[in-house]
Amino acid sequence: MRIKDNYLRSLSDGREVYYRGKKVDSIIDHPVLKVAALHAAKLYDVADRGHSNNKKEKMAEPEISTYFLTPRNPSDLMRRHELIYSTTKFCNGVFNISQAIGSDALFALSIVAKQTDRKYNSKYSVAVDDYHRFIARKDLTLAVAQTDAKGDRGKRPYEQNDPDMYVHVSETQEDGILVRGAKAHTTQAAVSDEIIVIPTRAMTPSDANYSIAFAVPTNTKGLKMIVRPIDELEGNSSNVLSRLDYELETLTIFDDVFVPWERVFLFKQYEMAGELAVNFATFHRFTAVSYRSATANLFLGTAVSMAKQNGILESAHVKDKLVDLIMYKELMRMSAVAAANSPLMREEIAVPNPVYTNIGKLYSNRSFSHILDALVDLSGGIISTLPSLEDQNDASERSYITKYLGAATSGNERIKMLRLAKELGASSLTGYLLTLMIHAEGSIEASKLALLKDANIAEAESLVNDIISQTTN
Amino acid sequence: MRIKDNYLRSLSDGREVYYRGKKVDSIIDHPVLKVAALHAAKLYDVADRGHSNNKKEKMAEPEISTYFLTPRNPSDLMRRHELIYSTTKFCNGVFNISQAIGSDALFALSIVAKQTDRKYNSKYSVAVDDYHRFIARKDLTLAVAQTDAKGDRGKRPYEQNDPDMYVHVSETQEDGILVRGAKAHTTQAAVSDEIIVIPTRAMTPSDANYSIAFAVPTNTKGLKMIVRPIDELEGNSSNVLSRLDYELETLTIFDDVFVPWERVFLFKQYEMAGELAVNFATFHRFTAVSYRSATANLFLGTAVSMAKQNGILESAHVKDKLVDLIMYKELMRMSAVAAANSPLMREEIAVPNPVYTNIGKLYSNRSFSHILDALVDLSGGIISTLPSLEDQNDASERSYITKYLGAATSGNERIKMLRLAKELGASSLTGYLLTLMIHAEGSIEASKLALLKDANIAEAESLVNDIISQTTN
Amino acid sequence: MRIKDNYLRSLSDGREVYYRGKKVDSIIDHPVLKVAALHAAKLYDVADRGHSNNKKEKMAEPEISTYFLTPRNPSDLMRRHELIYSTTKFCNGVFNISQAIGSDALFALSIVAKQTDRKYNSKYSVAVDDYHRFIARKDLTLAVAQTDAKGDRGKRPYEQNDPDMYVHVSETQEDGILVRGAKAHTTQAAVSDEIIVIPTRAMTPSDANYSIAFAVPTNTKGLKMIVRPIDELEGNSSNVLSRLDYELETLTIFDDVFVPWERVFLFKQYEMAGELAVNFATFHRFTAVSYRSATANLFLGTAVSMAKQNGILESAHVKDKLVDLIMYKELMRMSAVAAANSPLMREEIAVPNPVYTNIGKLYSNRSFSHILDALVDLSGGIISTLPSLEDQNDASERSYITKYLGAATSGNERIKMLRLAKELGASSLTGYLLTLMIHAEGSIEASKLALLKDANIAEAESLVNDIISQTTN
Amino acid sequence: MRIKDNYLRSLSDGREVYYRGKKVDSIIDHPVLKVAALHAAKLYDVADRGHSNNKKEKMAEPEISTYFLTPRNPSDLMRRHELIYSTTKFCNGVFNISQAIGSDALFALSIVAKQTDRKYNSKYSVAVDDYHRFIARKDLTLAVAQTDAKGDRGKRPYEQNDPDMYVHVSETQEDGILVRGAKAHTTQAAVSDEIIVIPTRAMTPSDANYSIAFAVPTNTKGLKMIVRPIDELEGNSSNVLSRLDYELETLTIFDDVFVPWERVFLFKQYEMAGELAVNFATFHRFTAVSYRSATANLFLGTAVSMAKQNGILESAHVKDKLVDLIMYKELMRMSAVAAANSPLMREEIAVPNPVYTNIGKLYSNRSFSHILDALVDLSGGIISTLPSLEDQNDASERSYITKYLGAATSGNERIKMLRLAKELGASSLTGYLLTLMIHAEGSIEASKLALLKDANIAEAESLVNDIISQTTN
């Protein structure tokens, strides 16, 4: 299997990346972006990350990354959940998307390709399977670009004033297609080997041109990536976590990018765009509840530590907030465990139960800000007024700061945890995480719609109708 | 296996039951109490309720009630969850406690008896196993009496002014013990064959006399049961559900009741009282989330039907409330599925994961009143001002009522569902269910304590300490 | 001013009232309905209920009921709030609507009559003023019928299959009109002297026939009132509050009822229907937050008393719930105080600030079920399993019940409070109050719309636009 | 009255201020700190900020800052609320504490000085009045230092290992005292003329040494101020608000600072420390709900603008969130209006109603994170992945960014609002504000205790006891 260095070296492949108004020559030499690359690279150091390949997958390799193992049953999904959870912990509580999101997309593509082939007599399954094998053999990292620029949210793709607001076919050629448009907040795109592109929503006949899925290497000509500013690393000198691990997002621009036919996985079959979006969403939300339960440890652990160091662990209101933190972490995990153990089978692939998956995600969407409340309350106002690292290190101030920030533990010890508490609860990371917990892996409204569609409401209606039918007066 | 009639006939055994100020001669002939008995009896009509006995249980019977099958692995727990869920639906959404709670207690007694025997060189395991086999062979129904009268909640058992506020040993005799005290709200006690009595809390050395567990037949001398008034049946002539199914509770008084040694399962080993209470609570809360998810169908189904009949199903605020109802139902179920699939093994018995179980229960405690809000909002104010059944049936009023209560469906059809909506959302059943959803299966505070004790907080602390240790500036 | 007996005697006037399928001959002799009448009659015993009439009102009477004093400034509104609050307390925490809702409607009619007269050159102001003076001089009680039967909620009045689903003009005659239709849940209609009828919503040109307002005496021919079943009185023998005070609601049927022109306050000016509905809603929601803050004392007082008697007053979770109960009560009151002190002036009438009024109401809608949670949690599960009054009074059971229900106070004392706690938290009154707190005085969605319309959003947009305009980079 | 320049010049007075590890020579020349100074200085540009002095205040000046007008009645408190609200809006929604917090402290000191003088025959009133007049005449800015370093929160001041964890008398001298210790997060201390110091909590006899109140000029010898890092200005190049207005906080160290007797307002009368803390808290929380309602406009305005620009204003879930934003803003304001109109009179000073004040504050504490949720949801995930200002200004990227960030408005226009939305919802300001909304003006637990103490619970208990006493069966 691939080793870390191979991955890191491959980043110097001419990809077009911008950061803070400048084109980045070498990611691995960039003081900020290299952190995202090294974070991604940790994937290759996860213990026991490989899985003996089963024959069904038709690959020669004796072992592939467990991420690329197609789930066929509850055990496979539980193994996947545990892998995502442990990898997130291995990366200090920060999600490592490098093979997670790509495999989510591959599984969804596999299902929809088969459905499409049956319906349209197409051959997408061959292309998807070939690509799956290629990725698995090479043990590559992948980004998935789904969310289009979108333009006016009140209009469909074909209704936009500017036709480029959703990624679309700009020209059909003999050996492939040109695509044009932009995808927003593509996580780790700039440090991934490949990018898979899928539709962001269901499409109508008029949107056929926008109904496409494909994959390209990150260094493809015409592909431009503008990385968000990593304020949590550059704008908070006290940070401790972001200097170890963070993930970048890009505005990902497709300026008439060429895609050969063998990498096109959907081409104008507009009826399948929604299917692909939804199947990906289900896999990816399963990934979400898995990593979020691991990330929740950051908040639970910091809150408990701060409460101890502040000397308030035994207060009733503190315990109440710890219960909320525990519920957040464990409800995510509970959602993953239940979803893994009650899968739907589609095209011989085990899809995590969408009802349980969406419940976990919705709980996370709705409750994360309470988790922030809890952390902030237990840590104390000092996390927003903490003297800077520069003050902490200044000879004339240090002794005062150390003295006066001591509590149930020494100032030196407490300041270390306060830096993490500030980073999580009162810094730019706070704002970034809040947005992530609300918007990542699909909007709240999208999850509500999924629940209304997938839940067994008929069972409930049938029960009350039975009761009514037994009424005799 | 036992048949319904055998159970119903056995109720006439001289048990001392009071209802509304009168001693009840024959439960099965009592217009109100017979409904609770017939509800219990439905247990014997559940399809496929038996399970082929495995050898480990050491019973001659080829088949026993699945309720009495000791869970040894996730599959057993999943089967138990499905059984409780389907039995509740079979009983029109009303929990059937008849063999559920008793088996919860038997499993907890099995675990704690083994622990106690090891620690105190006692022989409780033999007694518990014999009793388990006796119950399973006879296919009996059981109540469990746990919550003591308690007196002043600020004092421990031995500190109470009246020593009877917790059930205790009033006299030790050669062949057994006399017990004295009262247990509150014992569900279905008056219509069960046997009552198992266990401690309600952890005990101190001074509380040794209160640290007892035992079982007695319901018609034991000195045992008196005062049944709560069934206002939902007698006080709401429009009711449709309560006349089909309800469960009674009793104030259960032990007036120097004799218990032979072979039915004594704990005797003054005060250190084990808390263990027994907690192990029972975990099993019983697993039962709770299982039946509550089934009961939730009543609210979901009625709300959907009312929304349709009112003509508002497509409104955004209606869909939002349906999402909340779905979340309530499915989160309970998700809790059960996750708990079943991640059990703890204690004394070779699979205990439902206590973290997931308590999270489901806490969510139910906290969210049920929102479920009421949703049902009431979607049904409309008419559920509290609905003309009475007598008005609906009066010749001079009927046509007006039918005319003016029509909406997207006819008045006749809508009134039927309105009666159920009133019963669930604006009647004495509403108040009863709200209390049940908050207090049954243990208090909110008890579940919080369980979470704080059982959750893996150390994992979270370890993660943040690792991050701190990587901080170099 | 009028005295109680005059009111009670006047109830025997031939009005057509039905209860539980029977026509009621004499309300005051009816064992159930007389309680609602005696409750209404308490109005006449409220101390200092009169107000010296000011000349502007153009009435000969030296003193009129303060309820009928048109508010001209913050003091008048504060006096009105205090009157509603104290009258509610005088009636044991139960709202007394007898002159409150009628005056709410009169104020709204005064405003809209002037607006309509200006716009349409009509003479409604004269009719409204005359009627206001008539009511004030006679010191009468009034019901207001607003909520129509409505039929399919997805259709407008004129679109209904049955044209009677909203009250409408069925015939125009020389001296008046005939009206037809039904209004739902008209509070205290059967025990009021007069009924004012107003539109339930905004109307379109096609709905002109439905755009009417008028008043009739309760015993008018063709007016039929079907009273909801008072389950809280008849179906809970332990009740203590409902036997003292409750309010009835009726399905109020207008079967071609004649209204003389001098009692018609709006006739087909469809553009004013919404204005009337909204102005009434604002006054009536001000009344709502005023009485609800008084009613909240029932929950706060019972919860505190139960916590004391249970011996748990000092627990942190108990205090938290008391804080929630206090917030509920005082936030209602705060809403009324702020609304009274920041009125809008319309046609020289002080209208309670609609933003503050609707905020108070929305908080009540959303939070009442938490208040139930709090009461139920602090009272204990015993409120749903409390032995019946008949058991409490039975010689052979009494001593057991008294003994085992004692806690930090004696069983006799605690049972009294438990009866009230059951009535509020675990009885049919619970369900009735929950529906009331969600639906009375307008739906949640209606209050949201009012907030979106009335709140000063432009101020906020202006602020952020100012900031943007100062951005120079 | 004083003019802005006079204030700004006075900052160069030798005060000992540290920022990011360096002593600051000239605040007004410091690129970061000068923004806080200019923000403070805006106070002097507020229109109509003066108030004709009434004789009771015994000052020669014909006009003083309205902030320093002692409130004697509801009108004075309403004027104060409006002043704080309008000043906050004048400062772009950012609170201007410069004369607000100081006057809060002066009013509390006036009340408690009189109470102390009566009880202890002391002369603090003279000192407080003199100081009040001095401040008002000079029209100075003030910081208030209340929250001590605190050390182990589980121990009282005198129990701390390090006696300096609470500010205390380190030496008593003939002409004054030396004080020692540190106060945390003192808002705007480094840019204020004077600092008032008051106790943070109630004290016991053993804490007498810690029971002190006094005032000192900011440039007093031994006073050291370490300013928190202004990450929202320095760490987010897209910011638009923080470069206009922000407030700094300091760790404020008293290293044996001398205070002359005439500036000592409490000296070891430990019984009065709690009174002073609580009276200040009430005034300051009234200030809090006043400025928070103004600040809320930032969130409401940005959310509305983003919803419009995204093209989603008419969606039901968007309107729901706008309702929540409106409720947040207006509930704060409603709290202030009600508190101003229902004051308590203490020592002839109108104290804002503490119940209404604390309810407003608690609602803010509990709901602010929902407000963040709403803003983030309506703005979209793009606020956390927005290309940096540097990218926006880069020639080769600009056209792509502008093109693809357009929606219902042009990219250029939308980006401006996105920068503000990011600053409020996904930046270090987000975290800072969340901490502020939870911790500023006293902890959540402190406000709960205040409510339990001040609310009229007896009224509620009396009501339910009356009902019980009317029970006859």
Image (cartoon, coloured by chain):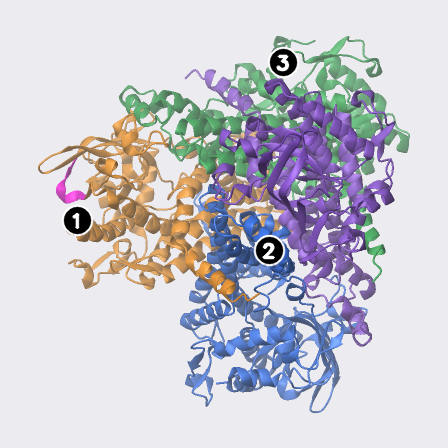
Chain colours: A blue, B orange, C green, D purple
For badge 2, the amino acid type reads Arg
Look at the image and give the residue range highlighted in magenta. B258-265
Percent from the top left, x then y, of residue B98?
30, 46
| Residue A301 appears anywhere in the view | yes
Q: For mark 3, does the 10 Å Cα neighbourhood hold few (<14), some (14 to 19), or many (20 or more) residues?
A: some
Estimate the x, y position of residue D443 in percent, counting from the top left.
58, 41
Relative to the observer, which residue lies in front, C186 or D304?
A: D304
Q: Amino acid at mark 3?
A: Val
Q: Secondary structure at mark 2?
A: helix
Mark 2 or 3: in front is 2
Q: Is residue A94 left or right of residue D433?
A: left
The residue singled out by tag 2 in the image is A398
Residue at mark 1 to residue at mark 3: CA–CA distance: 71 Å
Q: Are marks 2 and 1 in contact (CB under 8 Å)?
A: no
Task: Report how far apart the C-alphas of labels 2 and 1 lie in the structure.
Answer: 58 Å
Compared with A116, B194 (above or below) is above
Residue A263 position, x and y percent, is 63, 85
Q: Quadrant of residue C266?
A: top right
Real-space Cα distance between discs 2 and 3?
70 Å
Give the residue pinned by disc 3. Answer: C46
Residue B49 vertical placement versus A170 (above, below): above
Which quadrant: the N terminus of chain C?
top right
